[in-house]
Structure formats: structure tokens, C-alpha cells
Amino acid sequence: MPGRSRLRLPRPTLAEEMAFWRQGCQNVAGLDEAGRGAWAGPVVAAAVILPPDPKSLRRQLMGVRDSKTLTPEQREALFPEILRIARAVGIGMAGPEEIDALGIVPATRLAMLRALEALSVPPEALIVDALALPVLLPQRVLVRADARCLSVAAASIVAKVTRDRWMAEMDSIYPGYGFARHKGYGTPAHRQALRAHGPSPIHRRSFAPVRSPSLL
């Protein structure tokens, strides 16, 4: 059953954060993004600095996981808890025009750098999901860091909830595309809307399905 398999997933740990804390880096920012593969809307990144208190964090954030393994309701419930407990949270975006101009990977890095700049507490070290960042800070770049590291899992939830809310707002501005349902990702309904209406101003025109929806 899906619910049981979700419960069996290993919880993200504080092992990477604690390694930095032991080196004297108290403000360790975990970074992740949401929306990288979508056809419309921005890529949104979040940076989360957790307090160096492993015992309390394990108790207070025990429900935090990679956002992809959680339901929308679970993410929405965890979002304010992360904001309450974190030392600092920063959010950055790169819009569709920037994605089209730069490419999705550079645009994702740009969103992450903007998330770092938005932090109210200067980070001393970074744990980043998949992408190295051009900053003069110690950083650990890990594949699936959102499933392995608590601060990155928290960042994945913040980024996902922020982006989903933004896309739901766009649904009322650009009706007919179903943005509130699919959040800009590729679905049969989204393909049908593109065929019927053409791209909206928030579509990524460099993405093949948006350039040629009739071919899908």
C-alpha cells in the first residue's frame, strides 16, 4: 500500500549538518528547488538554516521528508513549522523568461543564489541537492540530498509549497490551463490546454512540449 511504503522510507538525518557544526560552522543552509521539470512557471529554490540542536530538531521536525514523498496536506502542515523552528529561511525564484534565456540548470542555480541572498542570517556552509553553487563557502553537494539531509528536506518543502501556491494564483490570472491542478507539470490535461489555447505568458517557450504541443 502507498501509505505503508511511504512510512518505511528512511528519515532524513542531521549527519551532514552535524559534520559542519563540529567544524564550527553553526549556520548551515540546506538548499533545494521545485519546478525544474515543469512546462510553466518559475523554478523556486529555498534555503533553510536549522538551529544546531539535533535532539530538538529530530522531535520537532520528525515529519519532514523529501517533499515528493508527502501529500499536499502534509506539506502545508509542515510549512509553518519549518518557518517557526528554522533560524532563517530564504526563497528565490527564476522566472520563465530567465529559464528560456539561460537554460534550466543555470536558472536553477540563479534561484538558489537568490534564496541564499534572502536569508536573514549569513550562511557559513551549504548542503545542496545535486548542484554546486559558485560561492566561497564550504559546501556538500549530494544526489538526493532532499531524502538524506533534514535541512535540505525542509528546503524542499518550503520550495514546493511556495511554488504550488504561486501556480494556484496564476490559475485565476490565466484560466483554462489548469495550473491549480497540475502546477505547470506535463499532464494530458495540460497538453490539451496547450493545443487549445497556445502558450500563456508563464509558459517556458524553450521547452519542447510548449514549442510544439501539436506533436504530443
Image (spheres, grey):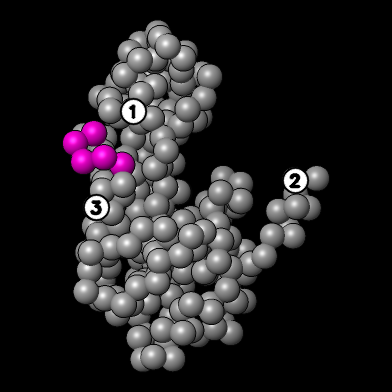
Query: Between 47 and 214, which is closer to the camera in this rendering?
Result: 214
Q: Quadrant of residue 32?
A: bottom left
Q: Which residues lie in the magenta part?
A: 100-104
Q: Main secondary structure of the magenta part?
A: helix
The residue that disc 1 covers is: 207
- Picture quadrant where residue 164 is located: top left
- Residue 172 visible (yes or no): no
Residue pointed to by mark 3: 110
Q: Is residue 161 magenta?
A: no
Residue 58 picture location, percent across and down: 60, 77
Q: Is residue 35 visible?
A: yes
Q: For mark 2, does the 10 Å Cα neighbourhood hold few (<14), some (14 to 19), or many (20 or more) residues?
A: few
Q: Does the magenta-highlighted stretch encompass residue 103?
A: yes
Q: Amino acid at mark 2?
A: Pro
Residue positioned 35% across, 11% down in the render: 197
Q: Secondary structure at mark 3?
A: helix
Classify residue 160 as left or right of residue 103: right
Residue pictured at 40% horizontal, 42% vertical: 35
In the image, 61: left or right of 174? right
Q: Say which amino acid is labelled 3.
A: Leu
> Real-space Cα distance between discs 1 and 3?
18 Å
**At 43% from the left edge and 75% from the top edge, which residue is drawn?**
50
Q: Is residue 130 above or below residue 86?
A: above
Mark 2 — residue? 2
Q: Residues within 10 Å of mark 3 (few under 14, many from 20)?
A: many
Q: Position of residue 117 (x, y in %)?
A: 22, 64
Please state which amino acid type lies under the numbered disc 1: Phe
In primary-sequence order, the first of circles 3 and 2 is 2
